[in-house]
C-alpha cells in the first residue's frame, strides 16, 4: 500500500492515520482470525463429548472455562501485540518511511495503540459471543439468580458486565501503552535492548500501580469529591433478593491512566527526538 | 548522546526501584492498588428491583413512658436512630415506604399502614400495624425510625436490613430475655447469655453507637461499625464489617469474621476471636487474649499481659519503655522473629524462631505465637534501662 497524501493539517493527519490503521489491521487480520478460531475451537471442544472427562456437563459451568481461559490470555496477547506491532516496523525497515511522512511521529504510536485495542476488543467479543452461541447458557443460572428474571432485568445484568469489562479494557490499554514505551526505550541501546525493555516495562507498570495507590489513599473516603462508578450486583440470601451497590473509586484508576498517558507522551518524545528510524 | 544516556539511566533507576519493591513486597504492590478501588458498599433490597414503584409517607408518635423500662424496636427493613433524652416522653418520627409492582398498589397499601407503640410487660414495643394478609403485588415495606427516648430505658434495636445509630443511654434496668434476644445470642463467648442493658443488631448497613452506660451486645453484619464511649462490658459480633471500638470502660469480647477490628483506649480485659481479619489494638489497659486465623495482629503501646495466637498471619507488638516490664515468650513456627531496639536475642531451630526473656520488672506475662508461617516483630521505643535477665 502506498502512503501518499495531499492536503494539509488535520485532514492529512486523519487520512494518514486512517490508512495506517487499516493497513495495520489488515496485517493483524490473519493473527486475529487464527486466535478467534482457536477460541471457538476451545469452546467447541468443551461442549463436545471429548471434554466429558472433565465433568462439566452444564453449559453454565463450561461458560466459566470457555470465557475465563481466553480472557486470562488476553493481557499477554495485548502486550505481545503492542510490542510486535512496533518491532516489525523496525525489523522490516518500514520505520524509515513511516517516520519520514509529513505528520507528527506520534501518529504512528496512536495508530498502533488503536490497532492493538481493536484486536483486544474483537477477541473479547468473539470469546463472549462464541460462548453465548455455543453454550447457550441461562444467564440467570450463571449468576445464581434463577427465578428473579422480573426483578433483575437482563439489560441491567449486562450493563454491570460491561462496566466490569470497561475497567479490564482500560487495564489492557495501560499495559499496551507501557509496552510501547518499553520498546521505544529499548531502541536507545544498540545491543542488549531486551534488558532495558524489561526494566522500562516493569518500571512503567510499577509507576502506574504505586501512583494509583498513592492517589487512592488520599481519596479513600466515600464522601471525597472524586468520580465514582457504581457496580450493582444481586444475590439471593434466604430466599430474599439483595442488591449490592459497590462503589468503585475512579481516582486511583485515573491516576494510573495519567501515568500511562505520561509514558505514552514520553514515548512520543523519544520517537520524535531520540529514536533512530 | 547525553539525553539518551539520561533517559537510559532514569529508566534503569525506575526499573530497579520497581524490582526492589516487587522483591520486598511481592503481590502487595498489586494488592495495595486493588484495595484502594472499593469506595463504600451498600447492601439493600429484599425482593426489590432497582427502580421498583414505591409510595412514601411519614408520621410522628408521642407517648408517655413513665411506667416503661425498655424500648423494643425490631425492624425488617429500614434505618433506626435512637437518642437518649431527659424526661418521660418518647417521640418517634418515621418514614414509611411501600414497594409494589405498581404505583397504585403501593399507594393503596400505604394507606393501611401506621406505626404504633404497644406496651408489653414493662417494655414499649414499636411496630408497624398492617393488614394480616399482605396483598399480592406488595414487594416490601420499609420503615426508617428516628426515636428520642428517655435515656434510662433499656433498648433492643434490631434492623434486619439497614443501619442503626444509638447514643446517650444510661439504662437503669436490664433487658428481659425475650425470644428475639435469645435468637440473636450465640455461645461464642460464654454458654449463658449475660444480662444486657442494650442490644443493637444491624444487617447490611452501618452501626454507630456512642455514650452508652451499661452492658451491651452489638451484632453487626454489614459495612462498618463505630462504637465509642461505652461504659460497661461489651460483646461484639461482626461479619463483613470494619469495626472500630474506642473508649470502652469495661471488659470486651469480640468475635469477628472478615474485615478488620480496631481497638482504641479500652480499660478492661479484651478477648478477641477473629478470622480473616486484621486486629489492631492501642491504648489497652487490661489483659489481651487474641486468637486470630488468617489475619495480622498489631498491638501498640502494650501495657498489660497478653496472649496472642495467630494462625497464618503476623504479630507486631510495640513495647513501651517505662517502669512496667514484661515476662516475654514469643515463638514463630515457620516464620521469623524480629527484634528491634530491645535487649532480646532471637534463637532458631529447624523452622521455628523464638525469643524469651524478661524486660523491666517482668510483671506482665506476654505470650506470642504464630503458626503456619507468620512473623513476629517486637519493637521498643527507646529501649529498657534494665538489661534482659534469663533467656
Image: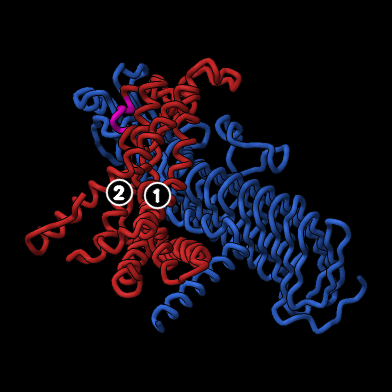
Chain colours: A red, B blue
Up/down of B217 relative to B386, above or below: above
In the foreground, A253 or B287 = A253
- Horizontally, residue B185 falls left or right of residue B241, namely right
Q: In which quadrant of the rendered view does residue A175 lie?
A: bottom left
In the foreground, A57 or A237 = A57
Can you tell which mark lies on residue A115?
Answer: 2
Tag 2 near tag 1, CB within 8 Å: yes
In the foreground, B79 or B88 = B79
The x and y percentages for residue B124 are 46, 37
How crowded is the residue under tag 2: few (<14 C-alpha within 10 Å), some, or many (20+)? Answer: many
The x and y percentages for residue B281 are 64, 62
Is residue B302 inside the magenta stretch? Answer: no
Q: Chain of mark 1?
A: A
Q: Earlier in the sequence, mark 2 or mark 1?
A: 1
Q: In which quadrant of the rendered view does residue A9 lie?
A: bottom left
Q: Residue furthest right?
A: B390
Bounds of the magenta segment: A151-156
Q: In which quadrant of the rendered view does residue B369 lie?
A: bottom right
User: Which residue has dot 1 on it?
Assistant: A81
Amino acid at each position: 500500500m502506498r502512503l501518499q497524501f495531499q492536503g494539509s493539517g488535520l485532514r492529512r493527519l486523519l487520512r494518514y492515520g486512517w490508512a495506517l490503521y487499516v493497513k495495520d489491521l489488515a496485517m493483524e487480520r490473519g493473527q486475529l482470525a487464527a486466535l478467534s478460531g482457536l477460541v471457538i475451537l476451545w469452546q467447541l471442544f468443551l461442549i463436545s463429548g471429548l471434554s466429558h472427562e472433565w465433568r462439566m456437563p452444564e453449559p453454565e459451568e463450561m461458560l466459566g472455562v470457555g470465557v475465563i481461559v481466553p480472557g486470562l490470555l488476553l493481557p499477554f496477547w495485548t502486550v505481545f501485540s503492542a510490542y510486535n506491532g512496533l518491532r516489525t516496523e523496525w525489523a522490516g525497515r518500514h520505520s524509515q518511511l513511516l517516520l519520514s511522512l509529513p505528520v507528527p511521529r506520534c501518529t504512528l504510536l496512536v495508530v498502533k495503540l488503536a490497532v492493538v485495542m481493536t484486536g483486544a476488543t474483537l477477541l473479547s467479543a468473539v470469546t463472549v459471543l462464541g460462548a453465548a452461541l455455543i453454550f447457550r447458557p441461562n444467564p440467570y443460572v450463571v449468576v445464581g439468580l434463577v427465578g428473579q428474571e422480573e426483578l433483575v432485568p437482563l439489560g441491567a445484568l449486562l450493563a454491570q458486565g460491561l462496566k466490569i469489562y470497561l475497567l479490564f479494557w482500560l487495564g489492557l490499554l495501560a499495559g499496551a501503552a507501557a509496552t510501547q514505551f518499553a520498546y521505544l526505550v529499548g531502541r536507545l541501546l544498540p545491543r542488549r535492548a531486551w534488558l532495558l525493555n524489561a526494566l522500562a516495562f516493569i518500571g512503567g507498570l510499577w509507576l502506574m500501580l504505586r501512583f494509583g495507590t498513592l492517589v487512592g489513599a488520599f481519596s479513600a473516603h466515600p464522601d471525597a469529591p472524586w468520580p465514582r462508578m457504581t457496580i450493582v450486583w444481586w444475590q439471593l440470601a434466604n430466599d430474599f433478593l439483595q442488591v449490592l451497590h459497590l462503589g468503585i473509586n475512579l481516582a486511583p484508576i485515573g491516576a494510573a491512566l495519567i501515568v500511562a498517558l505520561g509514558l505514552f507522551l514520553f514515548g512520543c518524545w523519544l520517537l520524535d527526538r531520540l529514536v533512530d528510524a | 548522546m547525553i539525553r539518551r544516556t539520561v533517559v537510559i539511566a532514569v529508566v534503569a533507576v525506575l526499573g530497579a526501584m520497581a524490582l526492589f519493591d516487587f522483591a520486598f513486597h511481592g503481590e502487595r504492590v498489586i494488592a495495595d492498588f486493588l484495595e484502594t478501588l472499593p469506595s463504600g458498599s451498600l447492601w439493600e433490597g429484599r425482593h426489590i428491583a432497582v427502580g421498583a414503584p414505591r409510595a412514601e409517607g411519614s408520621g410522628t408518635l408521642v407517648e408517655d413512658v413513665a411506667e416503661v423500662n425498655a424500648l423494643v424496636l425490631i425492624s425488617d427493613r429500614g434505618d433506626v436512630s435512637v437518642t437518649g433524652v431527659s424526661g418521660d416522653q418518647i417521640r418517634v418520627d418515621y418514614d414509611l415506604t411501600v414497594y409494589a409492582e405498581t404505583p397504585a398498589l403501593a399507594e393503596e397499601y400505604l394507606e393501611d399502614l401506621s406505626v404504633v407503640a404497644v406496651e408489653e410487660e414493662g417494655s414499649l414495643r414499636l411496630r408497624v400495624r398492617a393488614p394480616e394478609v399482605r396483598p399480592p403485588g406488595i414487594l416490601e415495606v420499609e420503615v426508617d425510625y428516628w426515636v428520642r427516648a428517655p435515656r434510662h430505658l433499656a433498648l433492643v434495636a434490631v434492623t434486619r436490613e439497614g443501619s442503626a445509630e444509638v447514643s446517650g443511654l444510661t439504662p437503669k434496668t436490664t433487658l428481659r430475655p425475650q425470644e428475639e434476644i435469645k435468637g440473636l445470642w450465640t455461645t461464642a463467648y460464654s454458654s449463658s447469655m449475660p444480662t444486657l442493658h442494650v442490644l443493637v443488631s444491624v444487617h447490611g448497613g452501618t452501626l454507630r453507637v456512642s455514650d452508652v452506660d451499661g452492658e451491651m451486645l452489638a451484632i453487626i453484619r454489614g459495612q462498618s461499625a463505630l462504637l465509642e464511649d461505652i461504659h460497661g462490658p461489651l460483646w461484639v459480633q461482626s461479619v463483613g464489617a470494619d469495626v472500630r471500638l474506642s473508649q470502652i470502660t469495661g471488659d470486651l469480647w469480640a468475635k469477628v469474621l472478615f474485615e478488620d477490628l480496631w481497638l482504641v483506649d479500652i480499660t478492661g480485659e479484651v478477648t478477641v476471636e477473629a478470622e480473616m481479619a486484621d486486629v489492631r489494638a492501642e491504648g489497652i489497659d487490661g489483659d489481651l487474649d487474641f486468637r486470630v486465623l488468617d489475619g495480622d495482629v498489631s498491638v501498640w503501646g502494650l501495657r498489660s499481659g497478653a496472649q496472642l495466637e495467630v494462625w497464618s498471619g503476623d504479630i507486631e507488638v510495640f513495647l513501651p519503655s517505662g517502669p512496667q516490664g514484661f515476662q516475654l515468650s514469643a515463638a514463630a513456627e515457620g516464620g521469623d522473629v524480629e527484634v528491634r531496639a530491645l535487649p532480646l536475642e532471637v534463637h532458631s531451630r529447624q523452622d521455628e524462631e523464638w525469643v524469651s526473656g524478661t524486660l523491666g520488672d517482668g510483671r506482665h506475662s506476654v505470650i506470642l505465637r504464630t503458626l503456619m508461617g507468620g512473623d513476629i516483630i517486637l519493637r521498643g521505643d527507646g529501649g529498657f534501662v534494665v538489661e534482659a535477665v534469663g533467656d
